Amino acid sequence: MSTDSEQTGTHPAEPHHDSLSARLNWLRAGVLGANDGIISTAGLVVGVAGATTDRTAILAAGVAGLVAGSLSMAGGEYVSVSTQRDTERAALRTEARELREMPEAEERELAGIYQAKGLSPELAAQVARELTEADALAAHADAELQIDPDNLTSPWQAAWASLIAFAVGALLPLTAIALPPVEWRVWTCVAAVIIGLVLTGTISARLGDARVGRAVLRNVLVGTLAMTVTYFVGVLFGVTVG
């Protein structure tokens, strides 16, 4: 007796492409959110540390940056994904209307898509007919729009993921600059940030199948530049005020 996995041609532990792709996209977004949290918060607290040695002021600025950055990331992601979701829903409504008004033309269009992918005209027509009989909207959404009608992206999930990822990344420089003595604060923060950026650069490169060395170097250079610029801005501000 054949199992479901044998009938579908997949291994029991093998993730489907769509679900694997979705998980990778979420993971990549999380890594990038953490990376933003590290760099922006590091630049902020190092800049304040350049202007003052007051631990309370540095912590207040860092916490404010963490909260503001997390909410900003979450809000931006919510708006962006909501817009994407609205666009996908509008496209699905249009497709559903076309299937009601001109089903034969839509089936021929679907057959043409599969024929363009390399199927013979006869096989493409058969595939289009069988997919249309099973679920016409799902077939057209997949072939034409690359949308899964039953798995649209959730703006709330995207918002929470961005908020948490940014906050986790921001905690690294905030903790690193708050705990050490005054003379070691900036250098400890720089070291911790570089380690964090190496990690996020490596993960993002692996997920994107890119060169790890180049991604890490780019990540570290951007973070180091941000901290250097903000530190000297803070020093200049501190000297001017003093």
Image (cartoon, rainbow, N blue to C red):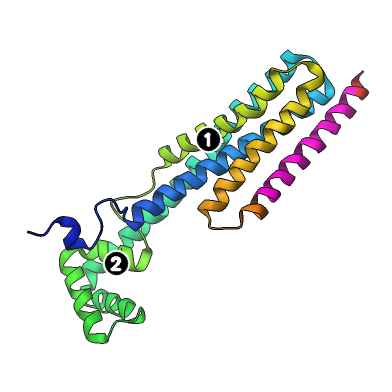
Q: Alpha carbon of mark 2 to alpha carbon of mark 1: how far?
A: 35 Å
Specify whether 227 is left or right of 129. Answer: right
- Across and down, in percent, residue 192 comes to 68, 31
Label of residue 165 in the image: 1
Q: Residue at x 23, y 74 (%)?
A: 128
Where, quadrant-wise, is the C terminus in this rendering? top right
- Across and down, in percent, residue 140 comes to 29, 67
Specify whether 227 is left or right of 117. Answer: right
**Residue tagged by mark 2?**
140
Asked whether the viewer can see residue 236, the reply is yes
Residue placed furthest toward the left: 1
Q: Residue at x 42, y 55 (%)?
A: 87
Asked whether the viewer can see residue 39, the reply is no
- Across and down, in percent, residue 23 comes to 41, 47
Does the segment drawn in magenta span residue 213? Answer: no
Q: Secondary structure at mark 2?
A: helix
Location of residue 83 with respect to 229 vertically, above or below: below
**Mark 2: few/some/many CA within 10 Å (<14, 14-19, 20+):** many
Location of residue 22 with respect to 125 vertically, above or below: above
| Mark 2 or mark 1, earlier in chain | 2
Specify whether 109 is left or right of 207. Answer: left
Does the segment drawn in magenta span residue 236? Answer: yes
- Across and down, in percent, residue 169 comes to 59, 33
Q: Which residues are magenta?
A: 216-238
Predominant SS of the magenta segment? helix
- The front one of 125 and 7 is 7
